[in-house]
Amino acid sequence: MAGKFTFKIVIVGDAAVGKTSLVRGFIKEKFSTEYLPTLGVDIYYKQLNINGRVVDLSIWDIAGQKGWEIMHKNYFKGSDGCIAVFDLTRIKTFENLKAWILRVKEYSKPDIPCTILGNKKDLKISIEVKPSSIEKITKETGYPYFETSAKTGENIEEAFTTLVKLILSKHNSTHNLN
Ligand code: G3D
Ligand code: MG
């Protein structure tokens, strides 16, 4: 169907940074989900309309708190976009972010569009990650950065929509659809 797109988005980051909460916050009440036992992955589906273009998203989220060691390359394979999340209140999760981004690039494609999310913005007094450190990684990667809260819903829609727009523009330039 003309104007219809299907994109796979993966969400990565350390355990308990808020990946599942963010995905659920984005999908809201209308979500359908599927569990892939072979990969230990929950897949969420959502349809968006962006500037008249219908976009079907599948958002892949690691089930439970399992770490990289159980992750299969198939989790990343064929991804069109990535959401890389750290927890603003835990510096370690920020230090691990680069490694997550490298894995995504290695197992999907080096020029994959991504957004970086500093989550748990609502926990203001506990914030550990310095703005200057964040600025450094966003400059290095060129990825858009959002401070989000899965608790209040702040910036979740913006972060996901920005990623989908990036994927669409890359897709259009590759396929000359504009
Ligand atoms: P994960 O999927 O990355 O492992 P989860 O993370 O979405 O399961 O979230 C881990 C915990 O952090 C959850 O708490 C969740 O409610 C909390 N959390 C996620 N996002 C935010 C946020 O933006 N602000 C605050 N204050 N908490 C958040 P529990 O207690 O259920 O384990
Ligand atoms: Mg989770």
Image (tube, grey):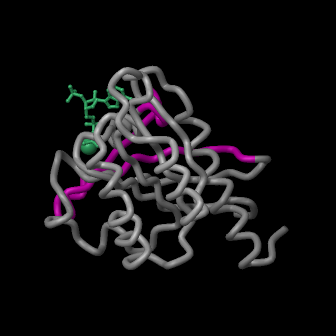
Position above or below: 19 against 60: above
Q: Position of residue 165 (x, y in %)?
A: 68, 54
Report the quarter where the C terminus lies.
bottom right
Q: Position of residue 23 (x, y in %)?
A: 41, 40
Q: Nearer the viewer, residue 169 or 17?
A: 17
Magenta highlight on residue 41: yes
Q: Nearer the viewer, residue 140 or 7?
A: 140
Question: Which residue is painted at 68% across and 51% down in the image?
Answer: 54
Q: Is residue 136 left or right of residue 174?
A: left
Question: Which residue is painted at 35% across and 55% down in the image?
Answer: 12
Q: Position of residue 126 (x, y in %)?
A: 33, 26
Q: Where is ligand 2, by quadrant? A: top left
Report the quarter where the N terminus lies.
bottom right
How many numbered dots are placed on residues in this image? 0
Position above or below: 57 against 140: above
Residue furthest right as drawn: 178
Q: Is residue 125 left or right of residue 169?
A: left
Question: Which residue is painted at 47% across and 36% down in the image?
Answer: 27
Q: Is residue 26 left or right of residue 5?
A: left
Q: Position of residue 123 (x, y in %)?
A: 37, 23
Question: Which residue is painted at 56% across and 75% down in the image?
Answer: 111
Q: For the magenta stretch, what is the residue range?
A: 25-50
Magenta highlight on residue 113: no
